[in-house]
Amino acid sequence: MEAFSSNADGTLTVVKEGAPAKFVLEQTVQTKPTGKTMVLDTKTNQIYIIAAEFAPPTAPPAPGTRGGRGAMIPDSFSVLVVGK
């Protein structure tokens, strides 16, 4: 009875259900800042997080927007594996 959140700050948050409708922070795991997309393999109980390095944006963001990001740096793609 756990929930997982892969965050833009480079962490994986693990929350455990202690009782119905009561959740407790179980653990925060350091990952990579760009690792936000994840998948849980329920057979092995491992989480796979994809990440890559990016160059700085080529133009400043327009007012009122978050802006984009630069191009992916070649050969920087990685898959992080997190398990118990």
Image (tube, rainbow, N blue to C red):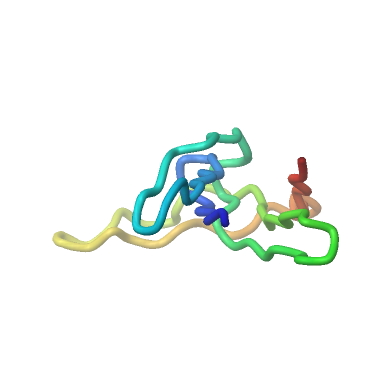
Residue 35, x across and y down, in percent: 60, 51
Residue in the picture at 44% in, 53% down: 57
> Which residue is more in the foreground, 71 or 7?
7
Residue 84, x across and y down, in percent: 76, 40
Residue 26 in the figure: left or right of residue 80: left
Residue 14, x across and y down, in percent: 54, 45
Q: Quadrant of residue 37?
A: bottom right
Q: Residue furthest front?
A: 19
> Which residue is more in the foreground, 16 or 40?
16
> Which residue is more in the foreground, 19 or 7?
19
Number of dots carrying numbers: 0
Q: Residue furthest left?
A: 64
Residue 70 in the figure: left or right of residue 31: left
Q: Quadrant of residue 45?
A: bottom right
Residue in the picture at 72% in, 55% down: 47
Residue 68 in the figure: left or right of residue 12: left
Residue 1, x across and y down, in percent: 57, 56
> Which residue is more in the foreground, 60 or 48?
48
Image vertical order of residue 12 relative to residue 74, above or below = above
Residue in the picture at 56% in, 54% down: 2
Residue 7 in the figure: left or right of residue 37: left
